Amino acid sequence: MTSYSRQDVLRILHLHARQLLAWERAGLIPSQREYSFEHLSWLRKLRDLRSMQVPARNIRVSVEAMRRVAGMRSPLTETMAVRRGSRLVFRHGGALVDPVTLQLAFDFEQEERSPGPRLQVVGRTPASEMEQLSQVQELFQRAVQLEETQATIPQALALYEQILCLRPEHAPALINMGTIRYNQRRYEAAESLYRRATEVDPEYALAFFDLGNVLDEMQRLREAIQAYQRAVELVPQYADAHYNLALAYERQGNPRRALRHWMSYLRLDPVGPWASHAQSQVRQILRQERLSIVSRRATRVPVAG
């Protein structure tokens, strides 16, 4: 069985060590030195839910309730989690299950992608629609598993394409395909997929964050900044988006705007190597800005170290 070190997990999922530690403390993932692919899949789901601003405590409550109600060991990987307000419901067998309230429902408005799906009673759901949703769920889980090794990436892509034939608005499939293309350095293909994800789900902050990353890689800094800005507008607590936005503003030669996002990042993630770098950038910008003020006033004042 393939195993991943802690550093592998942080690198593959673009996570900060503090975030992984926070999930461990919240009881969402066990603390350990090596992680299985199942753990990797679970953490990927947690990362996506974080980008949608679902509190860790609410994730834990919903997951534990789903385990009790459905007898599942791993609800986040065995089903598809859907945000409903600040809680989660789970798409399972074509139905949306709220394990906390024990309510079965169906999302007729999925294509409209409102921030909170409008739910209707399951009994009014066409059987063919339920079957298709169940099929899409199964295909998605298989595709994620096939991403585990390089040799099966083409099969994963084929399954994602099949999902999109069935449900063109399936944003997670678009994002996962985009990430595969990004890792292959096929940046134009990745950009196209990420843009489609932002179009079918304009409330999906992770799609805008990933779009910003690929645009940044392509040296299209102005567009990357716009994508990162949208991510933090959707989720003001999106620490990684603040970090990348600060870097982009610095490269654009706009340290004052960068400073705002370095400070935002430090409020959200004050500990660890990334925070140390952010603190260093804040000190440097403040030093430079103070020198700039001194120069304009034609007077000399001491600069703090």
Image (cartoon, rainbow, N blue to C red):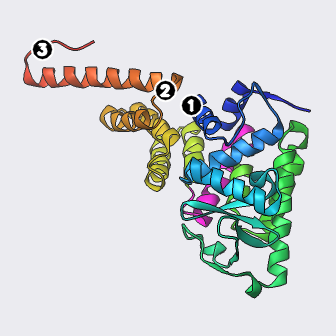
Q: Earlier in the sequence, mark 3 or mark 1?
A: 1
Image spot of residue 69 (x, y percent): 77, 63
- Dot 2: what SS? loop
Q: Amino acid at mark 3?
A: Val
Count of number-bearing discs: 3
Confirm whether residue 152 shows in the render.
yes
Q: Where is 272 relative to 132, above or below?
A: above
- The magenta stretch is 180-204
Image spot of residue 138 (x, y percent): 86, 61
Q: Amino acid at mark 2?
A: Val
- Dot 1: what SS? helix
Q: Of 200 and 216, which appears nearest the observer?
A: 200
Q: Is residue 103 magenta?
A: no
Kindly identify which residue carries mark 1: 18
Confirm whether residue 157 shows in the render.
no
Q: Earlier in the sequence, mark 2 or mark 1?
A: 1
Badge 2 vs badge 1, beta-carbon distance below 8 Å: yes
Q: Quadrant of the N terminus?
A: top right
**Cα gap from disc 3 to disc 2, whole angstroms:** 32 Å
Closer to us: mark 3 or mark 1?
1
Badge 3 vs badge 2, beta-carbon distance below 8 Å: no
Q: Earlier in the sequence, mark 3 or mark 2?
A: 2
Q: Where is 106 relative to 36, above or below?
A: below
Residue at horizontal 58 percent and vertical 59 percent from the top? 198
User: What secondary structure characterizes most of the magenta part?
Assistant: helix
Q: Residues within 10 Å of mark 3 (few under 14, many from 20)?
A: few
Residue at horizontal 48 percent and vertical 48 percent from the top? 223
Kindly identify which residue carries mark 3: 301
